[in-house]
Image (spheres, grey):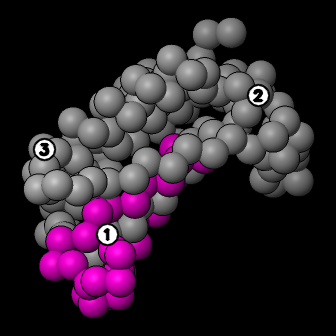
């Protein structure tokens, strides 16, 4: 049940490219969680938000850059990822970002920020979901 938030400077992607980028990122996160990207239940619980930052509003070391890095924030229930799956996710995300925006000379082209929501803190529809509840809903083997 990942929640993905992507921040990029306006104009980084055309809408069709943005859609493809989000699809690739979403599938990478599902794979890291050991969920099938083709599973309808897993897809229905993968929420992604794309936020464009106005040009001139991203500073790197006090400077405004023409091509600032992309920020990708991924929230998952605690225990959904382990160190191996986090490393694998970053490697996968790195390839995706490089494919879409290229490598940047002498600096990073993205940050991937992974945070875990503690057990008992993932809720909706008046229900607090456990990690087992999430895995069941997403058809992830336990």
Where is mark 1, residue-wise? 8
Q: Residue at x 39, y 34 (%)?
A: 90
Query: Along the polypeptide, which appears first: circle 2 or circle 3?
Result: 3
User: Label 2 neighbourhood size at 10 Å, few (<14), some (14-19), many (20+)?
Assistant: some
Q: Does the magenta portion include 68?
A: yes
- Which type of secondary structure does the marked residue at label 2 adopt? helix
Give the percent coordinates (x, y) of residue 100: 14, 51
In the displayed structure image, the side of residue 46 where residue 109 appears, left or right = left
Determine whether 38 is above or below 29 in the image: above
The residue pinned by badge 2 equals 131
Residue extent of the magenta highlight:
46-75
Mark whose residue sits in front, 2 or 3 = 3
What residue is rendered at 73% in x and 33% in y? 78
Q: Residue 52: x and y, percent?
A: 34, 77
- The Cα atoms of the two marked residues, 3 and 1, are separated by 15 Å
Q: Viewed as shown, does residue 87 lie left or right of 12?
A: right
Residue found 48% across the figure and 59% down from its top: 5
Q: In x, y percent, where is residue 66?
A: 16, 79
Q: Say whether residue 56 is left or right of residue 133.
A: left
Q: Which residue is mark 3?
A: 99
The quarter in which the C terminus is drawn is: top right
| N-term-proximal mark, 3 vs 1 | 1
Which of the marked residues, 2 or 1, is nearer the chain's N terminus?
Answer: 1
Give SS at disc 1.
strand
């Amino acid at each position: 049940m990942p929640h993905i938030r992507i921040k990029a400077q306006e104009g980084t992607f055309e809408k069709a490219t943005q859609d493809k980028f989000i699809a690739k990122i979403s599938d990478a996160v599902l794979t890291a969680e050991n969920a099938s990207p083709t599973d309808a239940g897993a897809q229905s619980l993968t929420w992604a938000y794309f936020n464009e930052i106005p040009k001139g509003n991203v500073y790197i070391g006090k400077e405004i850059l023409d091509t600032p890095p992309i920020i990708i924030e991924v929230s998952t229930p605690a225990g959904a990822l382990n160190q191996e799956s986090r490393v694998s996710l970053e490697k996968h995300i790195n390839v995706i970002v490089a494919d879409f925006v290229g490598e940047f000379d002498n600096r990073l082209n993205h940050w991937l920020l992974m945070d875990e929501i503690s057990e008992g803190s993932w809720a909706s529809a008046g229900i607090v979901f456990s990690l087992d509840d999430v895995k069941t809903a997403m058809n992830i083997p336990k």
